[in-house]
Image (spheres, grey):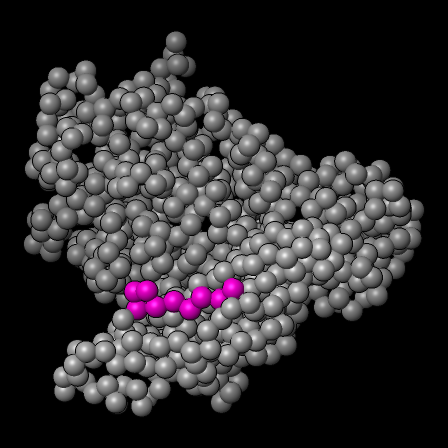
Amino acid sequence: MASTTLIVFSLLFLGFSTALEPFACDPKHEATRNLPFCQVKLPIQDRVKDLIGRLTLSEKVGLLVNNAAAVSRLGINGYEWWSEALHGVSNVGPGTKFGEGFPGATSFPQVITTAASFNATLWEAIGRVVSDEARAMYNGGMGGLTYWSPNVNIFRDPRWGRGQETPGEDPLVVGTYAANYVKGLQGNDGDRLKVAACCKHFTAYDLDNWNGVDRFHFNAQVSKQDIEDTFDVPFRMCVTEGKVASVMCSYNQVNGIPTCADPNLLRKTVRSEWGLNGYIVSDCDSVGVYYDKQHYTSTPEEAAADAIKAGLDLDCGPFLGAHTEDAVKRGLVSEADINGALVNTLAVQMRLGMFDGEPSAHPYGNLGTKDVCTPAHQGLALEAARQGIVLLNNHGPTLPLSARRHRTIAIIGPNSNVTVTMIGNYAGIACGYTTPLQGIGSYARTIYQQGCEDVSCASDRLFGGAINAASQADATVLVMGLDQSIEAEFRDRAGLLLPGRQQELVSKVAMASRGPTILVLMSGGPIDVSFAMNDPKISAILWAGYPGQSGGAAIADVLFGTTNPGGKLPMTWYPQDYITDLPMTEMAMRSSRSKGYPGRSYRFYKGKVVYPFGHGLSYTVFVHTIATAPTTVSVPLDGHRRGSANTTISRKAIRVTHTRCNKLTLGIEVDVKNVGSKDGTDTLLVYSKPPARHWAPHKQLVGFEKVHVAAGTQQRVRINIHVCKYLSVVDKSGIRRIPMGEHSLHIGDIKHQVSLQPTVLGVIKS
């Protein structure tokens, strides 16, 4: 009896809404059930206004933090806002726990792997599954409804420990991922929310701990051009296209101002310009960080006031709860400002149905234990891993292996029999695991040797057994790479090579191998494996990222040809010397010849690479032909705007704000023919090379599509390119413009020229 009481008390203390009682507006609570804020039929803004009007200042302040206090007199329970669902329901945040009927949840591949699929439909489908499981856990009293995912920062530097959490280096890919994953999480019931997603960390946040500089003290010096052109693109798409319910500001400063205290970023950009319908939350203890560590304000009350006035609605951490009331008393912030923050947080809770009384009456109230770790959900995790694996090299071709000819496989390497390594960071407890050793073992007899004790591979003590195994087998698979001891939150990498003596192990095993040698890499960031590319004894190389709970099965399916790989790299793989004399703290994207600065990402870097962005091979051969595409597109100018149209046109790059953009699209139809012997899925990547201009990218991705094509058949794919969004470039002042003239579109080996020509509409006012 005592232990049961303790469990119930613990759940209430942690802010859990149990399955037996509503979060608020309990129909059995006579004092509140008839109050306006409990009336489901009233508009949410009216309900929120009524509730705020009933709260005392102390009660309001208690709602400004992640572990929001209960308001018992109004029948409102405490609530823990912090839950995570980066690639499956996670127990990283205190809002979600496993146990009590929910021992685990489906753990999908880490985001960088899923991004390699370039499959927006898959991204949304994963979001739907994750939100099903999240709702089920909420209904069971084991989870929250506000998830601080996804991470949509740009993977700017290959050393960043959290790059694994992101969809890569390209703004369009990252933004498309953000919008689709958020749609999957939040549902499609109008303004109602299945769960509330959060796009983080806004903005220019991509350094954790490098060379003595950490994220708590870093001031990112970023140009207006790079903010508009790169760093803000995914967040804007997340808000405007994904309709996300929350944005999280980051720890770092941007140009001298903490992001969580910057009204230009929060109130002006996110709230006013992009139209966020939701709340803005701090990264955990960000307000405390800019007071205690960055010394941005003289007093804690000033720090609290700056955050709220900048547009912050919720503090992950205790700071606002501890200092806001005193800030009001000192006249630094008004109670009306606090009311404004609560309007945003309470509205999201009401959109989630948390003030609707009985949870069982909610559209998702029937989800429960039966809806977590279902065969269908786990099947999608396996399919996501298959689609995300990238075939980097395949000499011969050696792959796929033959279960008839390759009956004995030597499985070697520190990642060859791992479990939690496969799910990366911000993961929960998986439903179960299939390791690479187990996956390959379903196809052939295996000889297993670890080779290295762990990925740090400090010793050659286990090399002998590995070399001996390779000499006896029909084929050798080395599963090498990284894990969270090498790249993680608060842990940036020192270099790009395989850690320790891994390279030595690979080379010695390949030399001794009786059959073909295949190198499989697990990692979030890129690895310089030039040595393996140039080793004639290494027949093929695969990148699996962190492939999730079923990663071993997916790797085996690709190795033996059950799956024809179709993944493409979502980030550039640089050689080790790329990072020589290249500080992570240098934020510029564009190269500078005078400074000897190489630039970042495929859009701006022209030097040597190990593998380029978008690289990925197949077991079949696709031939592309442009079926239809315009050669000229008229760009209508809004002649009613002030200023000379002739001057605007003569500059050869029209401001996007001076055009009529809404339906201005360029449609291309591409025939994709599979001329090989195996069915396969082709990833069409469409790049644009704008007219030469020193502030434009070398090229930029403007569209992508997946298409499955059976062997010997052909499919036609239509890709619509929004001219203002994707054929525009950003000038040095941060102004987005559409270059007039010849744009070169690249799809695989084919190119198509299209000329953008201005057309003046309306009357010109000088």
List x then y, in percent, for residue 484.
58, 50
Q: On the rendered image, what quadrant is the C terminus found in?
A: bottom left
List x then y, in percent, for residue 364.
35, 28
Q: Quadrant of residue 760?
A: bottom left
In the image, residue 655 sits, relative to residue 328, either above or below, namely below
List x then y, in percent, for residue 761.
23, 78
Q: In this view, does 415 lie to the left or right of 39?
A: right
- Look at 32% across and 64% down and name the residue there: 663
Q: Nearer the viewer, residue 313 or 708?
A: 708
List x then y, in percent, for residue 462.
81, 48
Q: Nearer the viewer, residue 115 or 198?
A: 115
* Residue stretch in magenta: 661-669
Q: In this view, does 215 lie to the left or right of 470?
A: left
Would you say residue 665 sits in the magenta stretch?
A: yes
In the image, residue 505 sits, relative to residue 23, either above or below, namely below
Asked if residue 273 can be seen in this view, the reply is: yes
Q: Which of 402 and 414 is in front in this view?
A: 402
In the image, residue 363 sits, relative to residue 272, either above or below, namely above
Q: On the rendered image, what quadrant is the N terminus found in?
A: top left
- Look at 23% across and 24% down and name the residue there: 357
Question: How many numbered markers are drawn?
Answer: 0
In the image, residue 670 sits, relative to residue 552, either above or below, namely below
- Look at 31% across and 56% down and name the residue there: 240
Q: In which quarter of the image is residue 188?
A: top left
Q: Which of 609 and 490 is in front in this view?
A: 609
Q: In this view, does 703 lie to the left or right of 739?
A: right
Residue reaching furthest to the top: 1
